[in-house]
Structure formats: structure tokens, C-alpha cells
Amino acid sequence: MNELVEKHCDVCGECESVELLRLHGSAYHECKICGLIFAKWILKNYEEANEAAFAAELQDYVRKAFDDRRSRRLIRLLHRFEKYRSSNNFLELGCNAGSVLLRAQALGWKTSGVDIAYAATEYGRANWNLNLHTGTIDSAGYPPGYFDVVYSNATLEHVEHPLATLREVARVLRPGGVFYCNTVNWDSYKREILGENWFLIAPTHHIHLYTPKNVEMLCAKSDLTHVRTWTTGARVKANAPGSTFVTPWYLNLMKGPLSMLTRVTRKGDSIHFLAEKPPK
Ligand SMILES: [Zn+2]
């Protein structure tokens, strides 16, 4: 049922790695050569488990998709891509049912989305008439240099082959186009303090967790020019199922100062980065 398969560094292949944290019958390892952090053992039926998890959350996702506060925040972020508009083509990597793409469409973008979750992508195609591909970006077969923007929210931690994924992102971006991505920050105060009490620290679901250095390394190996990495959030609150961790009072008091510090230390909960396909 919950059979596991062993993994190696996605960048270096079979090489030496150091165990960082053992958890849920698996462990996070750090590659001794390139520093990538990966789940050493993942579920053999990872895609099936992923499908079941996303299908179970679909109605909740659809309900939240029209939350006004969330929409306003998203539209502010989407406005930041205006200066890259040329072909007018916008891709979301890990689009779920496509609520971000609905917002991008409303701003005039011609949108495409890709996600391995069938139930979610089928919902977006059937109910929102979106152009969504079920599968990985490699299997979508987009033309080279097609997109002005590739956008990805909370997806890179689920990706089994991040290097191949970023290389495909680089291939489908036009010269001068950009890749915006956010993901979980391994190198965060929250992970350092909470460890396995943070529900995102889960090697059977999140098969890669990244540091700012990791994403810069992956960009360098993918024909993407790294532009900027920043981090956000410093909420030291345990939320792993079954966790008995109680946030000490002094950590609640430190939320503000920690959040300020992350601007310099890049130790916020989430990593955001922007990379550009080099202009010709
Ligand atoms: Zn490596």
C-alpha cells in the first residue's frame, strides 16, 4: 500500500548525501555536491496519492478561489508582470483548477495551465473553459519561446524533477520572458524552530524543499538568469496533524521582529524568486 521508493539528487544522480531529518518513514537528505534537499524515499504511488489529496480539496479550493481579499492580493501580483507582456501568453505551472488563470484572463492574458491532478484540471476545463493540460510541463509540448510569463505558486515542492522542469520552463519562455515561483523555505526560522511540527515538512508529499541558494543553483543550471530571491512570513505556529507543540509565548512576541529580519536573512516561511530567460 504505502510502499516507498528510494530517490537520489535530481541534479547529480547517485551521489553522497547527508540525512537532515528522519520523518514519516522517509527522510530529507542534502546532496553533498550541489546542496539540493530531497526526500530520500517517496511513495511508489506518489501521483495517485497526489490525485486523491487534490481531489479531496477541490471544493474548498473552488470556494476560496473567489475570496475577495485573496483575489485583490493576486491581482496586485499579476500587475507586476505587465512590463513583460509581448506575445500575451501566460502559463501557470501547477495550476490546480485554474483560479489564478481566470484572474490573468480578466487582465487580458491568453492563458494556459499545467497540473498533474486530473480532477482539478478537468474541473477547470469543464466549468471555467480554461486551456489546461493534465500532466507535467514536459508532456504538454508547448512551442519554444511561447510564453512571456511562467507563474508557479506552491508547486515546486511537489515536483519530482525540478531541474528538468526548470529547463522546460526556460525552453518555453521567450527571450526576456520571466519565471516567477514561490515554494517552501527549508532555510526558514519556522523550519528551524518547528521542524517536523510544521505540516509542510512532509517528505512523502513535499519531495523537494529548497533554500534560496538551491533555487539560484537550479536557475544557473537551467538557462535562466536569476534576478531576485526574497522570502515572506515568519509565523512560528505548529500545525502538523497530531503535533503537541505549543508555541512558547516569547516566540509569539518575536513574530514582528523575525518578520523584519527575514528581509535581510531570507529566512521567511516562503521563498519567492524571479528568473529571466536571457534575451537573445
Ligand atoms: Zn546534487
Image: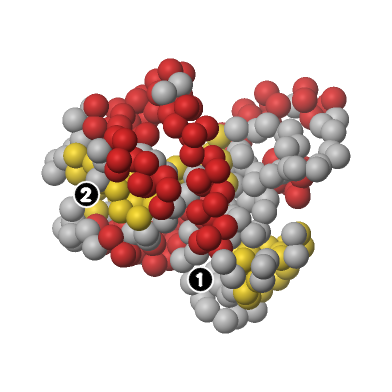
Q: Which amino acid type is shown beneath numbered disc 1?
A: Asp
Secondary structure, mark 2, is: strand
Residue named by callout 2: 147
Which mark identifies residue 40? Answer: none
Q: How is the image coloured?
A: secondary structure
Residue 236 falls left or right of residue 173: right
Q: Residue furthest left?
A: 87
Residue named by callout 1: 10
* Residue 11 seen: yes
Cβ atoms at labels 2 and 1 below 8 Å apart? no
Q: Residues within 10 Å of mark 1 (few under 14, many from 20)?
A: some
Question: Residue at left 61%, top 38%?
Answer: 268
Instruction: Please determine whether, in this image, residue 230 is positioned above or below residue 70.
Output: below
| Coordinates of residue 64 in the picture (x, y in percent) | 48, 27
Q: Nearer the viewer, residue 42 or 51?
A: 51
Residue 126 falls left or right of residue 255: left
Residue 268 falls left or right of residue 129: right
Question: Residue at left 57%, top 81%?
Answer: 14
Q: Upstream in the sequence, badge 2 or badge 1?
A: 1
